[in-house]
Amino acid sequence: MTNPAHGNRTFLGMPLPDHRGVVVLDQEAFTRQPGSIQAEFATVIGELTDEALSRADLKSVRENKLFLRDSGDGFVFGFSPEYLPGLLDRFLPALQSCLALHNATSGSRQVRLRAAITCGPLPAEGGPSDGYGTARNEAHRLVDASALKWAMAEASPHATHLGAIVSDRVYQDVVVARYCALHPDRFVRTIATVPGKTFRAPAWIYVPVPSGGLLTVPPLPPGTSSETVAPMPLSTDEDPARVGGPRMRTDVVQEVGQGMALANSSTENVRLSFTTTTAHKGPCR
C-alpha cells in the first residue's frame, strides 16, 4: 500500500528491529571554541564519557557501543535497553562528577554537556542503516530542546556541568516503573520543542546537580496560596485510608506560553503542574 505522508512510496513490510537505548551528548557553546581546539574537545568528551561509564559500573556499555558516531560537538551511541536504569541513575551523576573534576583542573578548557536519552526500535546489525530511526531522531531533537538549553543557562556553570532530558517513554517505562533508583520527582516535565523544527514531544528534564536559578522556588499559580499548593502530587491521594477518609484531588496547571516559570521569569517549552488536596466527606456530584 502507498502512504501519502511518505511520497506515496510502497511499503511491503519488514522485520521490526530490536529496541535500543540511545544517548546523544552535545557540548554547550561548542561553536564558540576556536577551530584549532575543537578536535581536542571532541576527544575530551569521549574520554570523560568512558570514564563515567566505568565509574557507573557499565563496562559492557563502554566496550560495546552501538552505531557510535561523532556529531561534531558531541556524539551519539546506542546500547542494550537493559542498561537504561544504570544510564539514568549511575552514568548521568558519574558524568556530572567527571565533568566537575575536569573543569576544576582544565583552566579555559571548560566542558558543559547536554544529554538526551531515548529508546526505540533501531537496527544495529553492522549494516549501513545501523542507528537510523525515529528513536535516534527524537534524541537529537531532545538534546536541542529549548527547555533544556534554558535550564543550563539558568544554572551556574561552576556547579552544574550536565543537564539531561529523557523521552516520555523512558520516563514512564524506567523511572515511573521504579526500575531506576532516581525518584520520579527528580524530573521536571516539559513539552520539548526546537526553534525552526516541527518537533514537539513530552519529555522530562533531570539535572544531577541543580544550581543558580534552578534552585529558586517557582511562583504560585494565580489565585492560590502557599497553604493550599504542594509542588508534587501527594502519594496519600492514592490511599484514602492513610489520611482518614476520601480526599478530592485538584490539579492546577500553570502554563507560560508552553514555557517554564521560575524566579519570576519565563522560558519556553516547560509545563509545571501543582496538585492540591482537600478533605471530601461525600461522593462527588
Image (cartoon, rainbow, N blue to C red):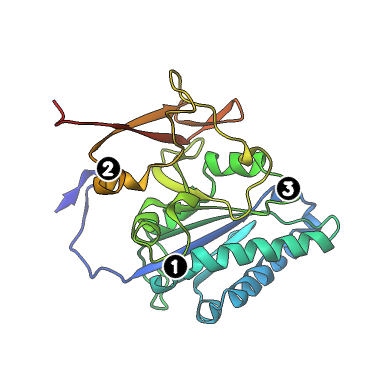
Q: Type of residue at label 3?
A: Pro
Which label number is shown at residue 157?
Answer: 3
Residue at image location 44% in from the left, 22% down from the top: 224
User: Between 70 and 22, which is closer to the camera in this rendering?
Assistant: 22
Q: Are marks 3 and 2 in contact (CB under 8 Å)?
A: no
Residue 120 figure quarter:
bottom left
Q: Residues within 10 Å of mark 3 (few under 14, many from 20)?
A: some
Tell me which label, 1 or 2, sits earlier in the chain. 1
Q: Type of residue at label 2?
A: Gly
Residue 201 showing in the rendered view: yes
Which label number is shown at residue 244?
Answer: 2
Which label number is shown at residue 85?
Answer: 1
Q: Residues within 10 Å of mark 2 (few under 14, many from 20)?
A: few
How far apart are the alpha carbons under marks 1 and 3? 27 Å
Q: Are marks 1 and 2 in contact (CB under 8 Å)?
A: no
User: Horizontal and vertical percent for residue 281?
Assistant: 20, 31
Tell me which label, 3 or 2, sits earlier in the chain. 3
User: Horizontal and vertical percent for residue 167?
Assistant: 41, 53
Query: For this view, does 162 lie left or right of residue 85?
Result: right
The N terminus lies in quadrant: bottom left
Judged from this view, the residue extending furthest toward the top is 223
In the rendered image, the vertical position of residue 170 relative to residue 267, given as above or below: below
Q: Nearer the viewer, mark 3 or mark 2?
A: 2
Q: How many marks?
A: 3
Residue at image location 63% in from the left, 44% down from the top: 152
Q: Residues within 10 Å of mark 1 (few under 14, many from 20)?
A: some
How far apart are the alpha carbons under marks 3 and 2? 47 Å
The C terminus lies in quadrant: top left
Disc 1, SS:
helix
Query: For this view, does 79 lie left or right of residue 107?
Result: left
How far apart are the alpha carbons under marks 1 and 2? 36 Å
Q: Type of residue at label 1?
A: Pro
